[in-house]
Amino acid sequence: MTRPRIVAYSSLAIVLALYVVGGVSVPPGSLRHEVQTLPLWFPIIAALEKNELAKWAALPCLVFWLMIMIAIWLFLLGWAHIVSGHFPPLEIAMTLVVGAASLAGLYVIARWRTTVRPITASGVVLLFAILQLLAFKLSLIPYVAHR
C-alpha cells in the first residue's frame, strides 16, 4: 500500500471511530463529532488523489487526535485530569482505534518525502492546525454539542 493511501485510511479510521462515538454518546452527539472531523476530510481526499499536500494537512490533525486520546487514557488510568467524563467500553475501544490510526499515520508521514516547498508545507500545517482547533472549539458550542 502506498504512503498516501495509508495516510488517507488512517485519517478515515479516525473519522469513522469518532462517528461511532457520536452515535453511542448519551446524549447522542453525532453533529459534534462530524464538526470535529471536518478538517480530516481534506487529507483523506487529497491522499487518495496522491496529492502531496495531504501529508502536511494530515500532520496537525493526527497529532491533535493523538494528544486528545493520550489525555483520555491518562484520565482513565487516574494519572491526570486533563479531560473528564464517563467513557463506556465502546468509547474506550474507539480511543484505541483513533490512537492507533494516529500513530500509523504519523509513522508513515515521517517516512513520506514530498516535493512540497518548505514554506508551502509550513503554511498548510499551520492552516490545518488552526482549522482542527477551530473545529474542536465549534463542536463545544451547546447547539452543536447536543445534536
Image (cartoon, rainbow, N blue to C red):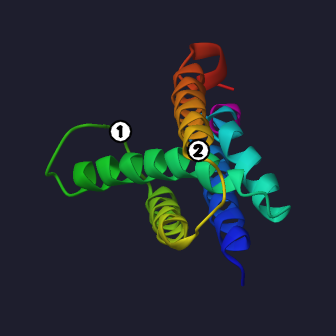
Residue 65 percent location from the top left of the image:
47, 49
Badge 1: how crowded within 10 Å, few (<14), some, or many (20+)? few
> Principal SS element in the magenta part?
helix
Q: Residue at 59% of width from left, 31% of height from top? A: 127
Q: Quadrant of residue 83?
A: top left
Asked whether 37 or 33 is in front, the reply is 37
Residue marked by disc 2 = 121
Identify the mark at residue 85; answer none if there is no mark: 1
Query: x, y (%) of residue 67?
Result: 37, 48
Question: Circle 1 — which element?
Answer: loop
Residue drawn at 62 percent across, 47 percent down: 117
**73 left or right of 107 in image:** left
- Circle 2 packing at 10 Å, graded few (<14), some (14-19), many (20+), is some
| Label total for image | 2
Does 133 sit above or below residue 67? above
The spot of residue 4 in percent (x, y) is 71, 68
| Callout 2: SS | helix
x, y percentage for residue 104?
51, 71
**1 or 2: tag closer to the N-terminus:** 1
Image mark for residue 109: none
Residue extending farthest bottom? 1
Q: What range is drawn magenta here?
A: 30-34
* Amino acid type, mark 2: Ala
CA–CA distance in space, label 1 to label 2: 36 Å
Q: Amino acid at mark 1?
A: Gly
User: Image height check: is 54 above or below 136?
Assistant: below
Residue 89 is one of the magenta-drawn residues: no
Residue 31 included in the magenta stretch of the image: yes
